[in-house]
Amino acid sequence: MTDDDEHDSHIYLDTAASTPVADEVIAEMLPYLKERYGNPSSIHKFGRETTRAINLARKRVAEMIGASSSREITFTSGGTEANNLALKGTAMHVKSKMPEKNMIITSSIEHDAVLEPCKDLEDGGFVTMHLPVTDEGFVRPSELKNVISDNNVALVSIMYANNEVGTIQPIKELVEIAHQAGALFHTDAVQAAGKLPLNVKNLGVDMMSLSSHKINGPKGVGALYIRSNLKILPIIHGGGQEWYLRSGTENVPGIVGFGKACELANKRVGQYQEHVAGLRNYLVERVLKEIPRSRLNGLRTERIANNAHFTFFGVNGEDLIIKLDENGIAASTGSACSVKKQKQSHVLKAMGFSYEEITGSLRLSLGMHNTKDEVDRAVDILSSVIKELRELSPFESKYVAEMG
Amino acid sequence: MTDDDEHDSHIYLDTAASTPVADEVIAEMLPYLKERYGNPSSIHKFGRETTRAINLARKRVAEMIGASSSREITFTSGGTEANNLALKGTAMHVKSKMPEKNMIITSSIEHDAVLEPCKDLEDGGFVTMHLPVTDEGFVRPSELKNVISDNNVALVSIMYANNEVGTIQPIKELVEIAHQAGALFHTDAVQAAGKLPLNVKNLGVDMMSLSSHKINGPKGVGALYIRSNLKILPIIHGGGQEWYLRSGTENVPGIVGFGKACELANKRVGQYQEHVAGLRNYLVERVLKEIPRSRLNGLRTERIANNAHFTFFGVNGEDLIIKLDENGIAASTGSACSVKKQKQSHVLKAMGFSYEEITGSLRLSLGMHNTKDEVDRAVDILSSVIKELRELSPFESKYVAEMG
């Protein structure tokens, strides 16, 4: 049997890594891959029709997040670039105007797409502070309050929902604290979008990063919301596209698809929460009941709908996802983007997890495409694979000996 | 009649701005928009199949430019990002190792995607020198030789072929001069790719920028060739994709499409030159013969196959392309990316053109999709539109008075 034959039977439980592109999204993209191939900067018909398409997409993105105007949306090549633009673009602008504001505050559980730009800014003279989190991956507003009093903070960047354990952060409270101290606030909402109703005005954030491929749009496109009248500097220079903030010929089919995905996500967020959180809760319930020595990580309530994150004691998570894959289930130990680095999850470390707790962790992230039948099959397989692995595991004998 | 109805009858002569995506390219992309939606960083089946697809695309890009290994290809979101990565990534790395090398040499006719990153680097302490060009837009190697003797040059960046007038630069000679002076060499080959057989080894360049949508691939993807063992720094930080040089989830459908477009471009470069240069030469011949006071700009021989660039004296180029558009022809006055800036072409200025010569300029850029019949219709329309505009033009009476 080839990979292709297996495709339909595979159960995809890794929507935190990427999602299937919705059919309606592909349908809207296709004309821009086919007959509508103009460069939006061209003033002829071919250029005007792609400009109109980008304008509509921009409006749809703005609507999904409750922005006051399309003008507040800058398209990028994805969430990572949006985060880089927010962090570096803000830092560089603040540095040129108020060099005394040389501090950036973030959390210890951000995605590498925030942590690594921060490291780069440290090389450029900025000081970065990483707020600690609770053992459920929650950033306490009091922690921010404690450290921000100095008035030397340029930017606070805290993710809206964590990509590994799904914990939702108290963004509105954090924004108020940041603003009181004269700092700007950015949130990486890549994992929150489509799972929560987003409203930048209500939250009060100055910037928000979005990614298309996490919400059933195509890969290779994202956006940064930048509040009206907030000036930041570009990181990619050239022809002056995207309000001079992001040069390069626009990825028209990608932007069109992203716009449609935002429209769909916005319309169906209630349905998403009902369907996906419903399945997720059922999954969690069955796992905790049927699989011994299992634990759900993260918060129960302040948690995005698609995320389930477990520790299975006495199991190696890497072995687990390989075995699950062999048995037709696509899952993850944590951030897909960390796999190549083969490093232990900094998120779980920050949550105070032991080596064994980290090693035994598994993330199952669901989507609109999943069914109750799939969840049932997945739990059955998970249960038997874990049993099998535990029988082979060196942890197991240790555990049994300790429990003696 | 709506825009859509007109679509088939419109004659597209703006391939320097963007090109139609080839059917074979779309066909290869579609599975990666549909069932193959995995994140390449995931270790399960969905991730492995997208990783394989990227590997194949990388091999195809490497083959098109004669790179020794796929490892030398780094995918980006397009040509602009590739140029930014080459310039800033090199400058920042050299600065950290050899701070005395603080000069960058480029030409006065580069695309804004080179000129603007250079300006940004000037803010960071680099000195940029812009080589002059001949009135045909040619960079004389002697000009580089004259200024590079100081041994303080980090990087020379000269485009392979100009986007406005199509002049091909003597890259191999320029590379030798740069290397003798201990400088690295980058070329923006966005307009040259697909029109010339490219060979990085033969040229000796250290870096080369490519863009997908100029060679019948999708928008939103490009690549930077970086010679083996050459170290540069990333400009977008995060999960460590693309050899830690370009973080962010890979634009899998875009990369797949770009790879296929490179394969096609590589196979058909001879056919391209024959068909497109044949049509272009026929176009030029008819225009110069039938339209009074017209001039071909740029070099006759060292010129990419698709480019025809004219000055029509006594005509305003902006009016001309609007009239052409109304009559079903998509053309350009110059770089699409400069339109929004509404500035006069820096390329034509550098070539010593007068205000009137710049104002009267028109770029017609052809492609594989064009036919002799289209060229005939285009010349007929161009001829009558120019006649009409000249009758209305204030330049006309001036010209007639002067000639009088």
Image (cartoon, coloured by chain):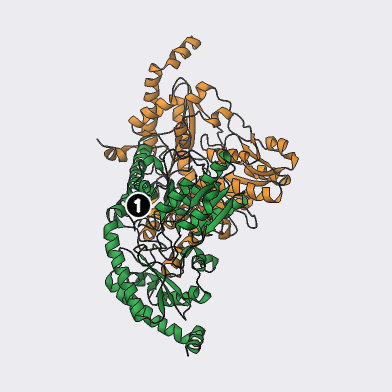
Chain colours: A orange, B green
Regarding mark 1 in the picture, which secondary structure is present there? Answer: loop
The quadrant of the image that shows the N terminus of chain A is top left
Q: Which percent across, then down, holds residue B98?
A: 57, 40
Check disc 1 and give the amino acid type: Leu
- Image height of A331 relative to A174, above or below: above
In the image, farthest residue toward the left? A1
Q: Compare residues B51 and B302 and report the one nearer the observer.
A: B302
Q: Compare residues B95 and A11 and report the one nearer the observer.
A: B95
Left or right: B191 as drawn, with respect to A136: left
Write down the chain letter for disc 1.
B
- The residue that label 1 is drawn on is B198
- Image height of A270 relative to B288, above or below: above
Q: Which percent across, then down, holds residue B320?
A: 44, 77
Q: Which percent across, then down, holds residue A255?
A: 46, 55
In the image, farthest residue toward the right? A150
User: Which residue lies at the image location 46% right of the left edge and 69% below the top edge?
Assistant: A43
Q: Compare residues B153 and A184 and report the one nearer the observer.
A: B153
Residue B371 figure quarter: bottom left
Badge 1: residue crowd in 10 Å (few <14, some 14–19, many ≥20): many
Residue A370 appearing in the image? no
Q: Compare residues B86 and A10 and report the one nearer the observer.
A: B86
Residue B363 appearing in the image? yes
Q: Which percent across, then down, holds residue B143?
A: 49, 58
User: Which residue lies at the image location 57% right of the left edge and 35% below the top edge?
Assistant: A109
